[in-house]
């Protein structure tokens, strides 16, 4: 195959992402500061791969200077992480700040800036305090929106002078989908109406926090922006037949547009609202709340892209005794001959990046956006070590370059794509899978006191950042 060279535009972000709970560990955490994930892990450690969970994670809390030196060595332009809401406050009702944890975040942000890495901060990456889950039912309660806004205001006041890029949530649809739609996570309750209420309350929380951000912007960086990070399962119909097209349309309504539209357009799709009423799962809301969503939309948006979602019209009889699920309208479809990541069970289809870019250009006012997460998780990577003990992750290099090439195509076609953030900087813990699938540019050696070792992909990424260009094999995705 011929090689194709891609030039990266000036100012294009080339960074990496992580979250607080997946990296920090519990060192220094008070017993009253459990997050929902800490609570789940304590209740169900056996469902986490080999028992690894958030308790130690990558020990970033103690080793952040070491990790930031690796970021500097690789040349990351940006690093995106989260504030662990459950640790940032001592009292969630009064928003009293924990000065120890807040001081640690000061040090992390300052060290990033000192090393030439721009911090990007997310306010919630699944880290809702456990006590709010137990007392209020988590994001099912409007009270939690008030408490989240009070927390956000404290974070803006504390770090707004140094942080340019803020996000309200990372993947706001995911926790409740796993908890209430598919009942795969603690407390394992299938309740579609609760799922939809969580969806709405997080959209409203985003608008409320944006309103706060805009009102206090004079005390932040002049160029500060606020957005949200959405995981988009770019939906492709099995065929051009109307029934398959309708299945993909409805899938997209429930899992993509449920956040895309209120975040960027400030309104919900009429077709979605009609389905919510039809199936008696409409969220509790009033006109004032819809007005807040309409008036306070995001400045930019992060999009997490990993794999496509392929659907077809359902062929089976729905069991009417079960609660409504959007799968009433679709079935998943596996494309024959698809390229797969067998470890994660996901199709590899880089075209999702281009198609998402075109969608944002054509349907969402060409809003500024960045790929906030994209990466490849592989099991037992130690199999690929060379004689020097360096993981030869050529599969990750191919994955990054093929997806980044689609971003360059989208930019050439007019999409307002501003950057690419790899998931993840280091290997880290994921819900249930723990350290099973490794995503990092940097290996975490669990059996060797969590030592860090750069992988081959780290050199590849450094070269891209330094030279502002890269090569791919020339091929076409059907």
Image (spheres, rainbow, N blue to C red):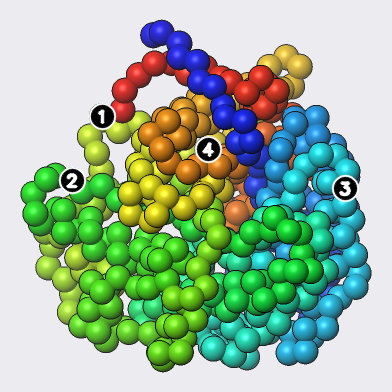
Position of the N terminus, as image quadrant, is top left
Which quadrant holds residue 159? Answer: bottom right
Residue drawn at point x = 73 percent, y = 14 percent: 387
Lower position in the chain sequence, tag 4 or tag 1: 4
Which sits in the foreground, 367 or 154? 367
**Cα distance between the residues tagged 2 and 1:** 13 Å
Q: Can residue 408 be seen in this view?
A: yes
Q: Is residue 352 left or right of residue 175?
A: left
**Cα distance between the residues tagged 4 and 2:** 25 Å
- Say if mark 2 contacts mark 3, CB within 8 Å: no
SS assignment at label 1: loop
Which sits in the foreground, 400 or 321? 400
On screen, 353 above or below 179?
Answer: above
Q: Is residue 337 left or right of residue 318?
A: right
On screen, 163 above or below 90?
Answer: above
Residue drawn at point x = 41 percent, y = 62 percent: 260
Q: Position of residue 112 (x, y in %)?
A: 82, 46
Q: Position of residue 10 (x, y in %)?
A: 62, 30
SS assignment at label 3: helix
**Cα distance between the residues tagged 4 and 1:** 21 Å
SS assignment at label 2: loop
The circle drawn on residue 111 is 3
Q: Name the residue under label 4.
A: 376
Lower position in the chain sequence, tag 2 or tag 3: 3
Lower position in the chain sequence, tag 3 or tag 4: 3
**Cα distance between the residues tagged 3 and 1:** 45 Å
Residue drawn at point x = 44 percent, y = 76 percent: 294
Q: Mark 1 points at which residue?
A: 478
Q: Mark 2 points at which residue?
A: 238
**Cα distance between the residues tagged 2 and 3:** 49 Å
């Amino acid at each position: 195959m011929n090689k194709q060279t891609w030039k990266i535009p000036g100012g294009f972000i080339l960074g990496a992402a992580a979250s607080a709970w997946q990296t920090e560990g519990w060192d220094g955490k008070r017993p009253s500061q459990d997050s929902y994930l800490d609570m789940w892990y304590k209740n169900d450690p056996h469902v986490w791969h080999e028992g690894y969970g958030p308790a130690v994670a990558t020990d970033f809390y103690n080793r952040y200077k070491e990790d930031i030196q690796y970021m500097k060595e690789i040349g990351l332009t940006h690093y995106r992480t989260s504030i662990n809401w459950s640790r940032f406050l001592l009292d969630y009702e009064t928003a009293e700040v924990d000065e120890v944890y807040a001081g640690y975040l000061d040090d992390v942000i300052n060290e990033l800036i000192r090393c030439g890495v721009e911090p990007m901060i997310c306010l919630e990456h699944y880290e809702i305090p456990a006590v709010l889950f137990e007392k209020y039912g988590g994001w099912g309660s409007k009270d939690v929106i008030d408490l989240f806004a009070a927390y956000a205001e404290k974070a803006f006041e504390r770090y707004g002078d140094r942080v340019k890029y803020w996000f309200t949530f990372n993947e706001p649809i995911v926790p409740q989908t796993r908890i209430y739609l598919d009942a795969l996570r603690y407390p394992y309750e299938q309740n579609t109406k609760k799922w939809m209420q969580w969806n709405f309350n997080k959209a409203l929380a985003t608008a409320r926090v944006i309103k706060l951000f805009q009102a206090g912007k004079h005390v932040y960086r002049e160029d500060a922006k606020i957005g949200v990070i959405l995981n988009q399962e770019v939906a492709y119909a099995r065929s051009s037949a109307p029934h398959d097209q309708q299945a993909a349309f409805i899938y997209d309504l429930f899992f993509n547009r449920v956040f895309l539209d209120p975040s960027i357009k400030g309104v919900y799709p009429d077709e979605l609202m009609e389905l919510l009423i039809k199936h008696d799962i409409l969220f509790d809301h009033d006109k004032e709340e819809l007005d807040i969503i309409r008036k306070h939309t995001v400045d930019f948006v992060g999009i997490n892209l990993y794999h496509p979602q392929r659907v077809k019209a359902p062929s089976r009889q729905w069991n009417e005794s079960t609660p409504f699920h959007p799968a009433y309208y679709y079935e998943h479809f596996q494309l024959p001959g698809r390229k797969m990541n067998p470890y994660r069970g996901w199709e590899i289809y880089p075209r999702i990046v281009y198609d998402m870019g075109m969608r944002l250009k054509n349907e969402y006012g060409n809003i500024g956006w960045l790929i906030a997460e994209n990466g490849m998780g592989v099991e037992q990577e130690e199999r690929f070590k060379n004689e020097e003990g360096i993981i030869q992750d050529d599969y990750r290099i191919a994955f990054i370059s093929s997806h980044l090439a689609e971003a360059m195509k989208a930019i050439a076609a007019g999409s307002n794509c501003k950057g690419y953030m790899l998931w993840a900087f280091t290997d880290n813990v994921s819900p249930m899978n723990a350290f099973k699938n490794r995503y990092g540019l940097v290996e975490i050696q669990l059996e060797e006191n969590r030592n860090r070792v750069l992988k081959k992909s780290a050199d590849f990424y450094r070269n891209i950042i330094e030279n502002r260009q890269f090569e791919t094999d020339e091929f076409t995705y059907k």
